[in-house]
Image (cartoon, rainbow, N blue to C red):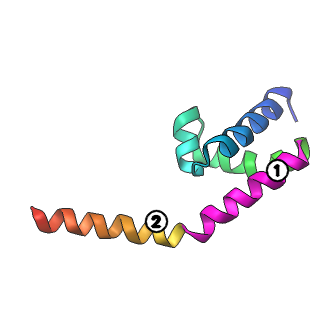
Amino acid sequence: MHEHIRHRCVRLGELLIETGETVRVLAKMTGYSKSTVHKDLTERLFLVNEELANEVKEILAYHKSIRHLRGGEATRKKWQSRQKQ
């Protein structure tokens, strides 16, 4: 693995821990694609820094566990805004 990819993985992992944001938000913040951010955090980070990867894994698991709630809320807001028009 190239050195710049290793640094990117660590930076993304630290940023996730600091902010607690979703993969989609991290991708927008950093300018990387959502796929790249996800692959760096779920696969490559374990090869670079296992301790950091375990912390990131817990945060990603939490985001996955509440994903259906966020989607439902977004749909609710969408339909409420349409009813007002």
**Whole-percent x, y for residue 48 in the image:** 89, 41
Does the residue at mark 2 contact the one at mark 1 (Cβ under 8 Å)? no
The magenta segment: 49-66
- Asked which secondary structure carries label 1, the reply is helix
**Mark number for residue 53?**
1
Residue pictured at 85% horizontal, 30% vertical: 2
Q: What separation in Å lies between label 2 and label 1 (alpha carbons)?
A: 24 Å
Q: Is residue 83 left or right of residue 52?
A: left
Quarter of the view holding residue 64:
bottom right
Q: Is residue 57 magenta?
A: yes
**Whole-percent x, y for residue 73 in the image:** 38, 68
Residue pictured at 11% horizontal, 64% vertical: 84
Q: Amino acid at mark 1?
A: Ala
**Whole-percent x, y for residue 32 in the image:** 60, 36
**Whole-percent x, y for residue 78 in the image:** 27, 64
Q: Amino acid at mark 2?
A: Arg
Give the answer, above or below, for where 35 lies relative to 8: below
Return the residue at label 2: 70
Give the answer, above or below, for where 8 lies relative to 71: above
